Image: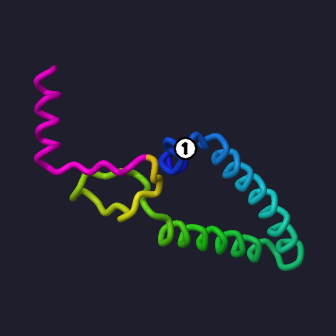
Amino acid sequence: MVIADLTQGTGRFNLTLGAISTAVGIGAALSQLIAGSIVHQFGSSAGFLFLSGVAAAAFALLFFLMPETKNFIKGSSPAPKTSINPVQPKIRLTRKALRNRMKKVARRV
């Protein structure tokens, strides 16, 4: 979903998805290599601690540094102040406009 939100309207979804998938594959291969040598040298508990530390660091980086990419209705949740994709401006609805749209949809049904 993040890739789709960030690349919407640019035509680069497949390229970005391929780059992310390649990074995941390289990370998986390197983690086995590094953790395997740590386990060989220091034991299985050291290898587990190393991998859990890497996972905790990755979670902290994503939690604190990754902005929300989905467009939100005004007032429902904090969204980034600037648009990530300049081609596709963010659409923000007031509560009144949202109520009016919901009434129109309800009349159609």
In the foreground, 35 or 69: 69
Q: Amino acid at mark 1?
A: Thr
Residue 90: x percent and y percent? 35, 51
Find residue 99 and report its horizontal and vertical position in percent.
Answer: 12, 41
Residue identifier under label 1: 10
Where residue 51 appears, as percent x and y from the top left, is 70, 69
Look at the image and name its color scheme. Answer: rainbow
Disc 1 is placed on an element classified as loop
- Front residue of 99/54: it is 99
Q: How many marks?
A: 1
User: Could you tell whether 58 is left or right of 33 in the image?
Assistant: left
Please, is residue 48 above or below residue 32 in the view? below
Quarter occupied by residue 30:
bottom right
Q: Determine whether 31 is above or below 42 in the image.
A: above
Which residue occupies 51% across, 51% down? 6
Nearest to the observer: residue 15 or residue 34: 15
Residue at image position (59%, 71%) is 56
User: Is residue 101 toward the left or the right of residue 52 in the image?
Assistant: left
The residue lying furthest to the bottom in this view is 42
Q: Residue at x 54, y 43 (%)?
A: 10
In the picture, the quarter occupied by the C terminus is top left
Whether 93 is among the magenta residues is yes
- Answer with left or right where residue 32 lies relative to residue 102: right
Please give left or right for residue 34 compared with residue 67 in the image.
Answer: right
Height in image: 9 above or below 25? above
Q: Quadrant of residue 45?
A: bottom right
Other-residue count near label 1 (Cα within 10 Å), few / some / many at <14 / 14–19 / ≥20: few
Location of residue 38 (image quadrant): bottom right
Residue at image position (53%, 72%) is: 60
Please provide the residue range marked out in magenta.
88-109
Residue 73 location, x and y as percent? 26, 51
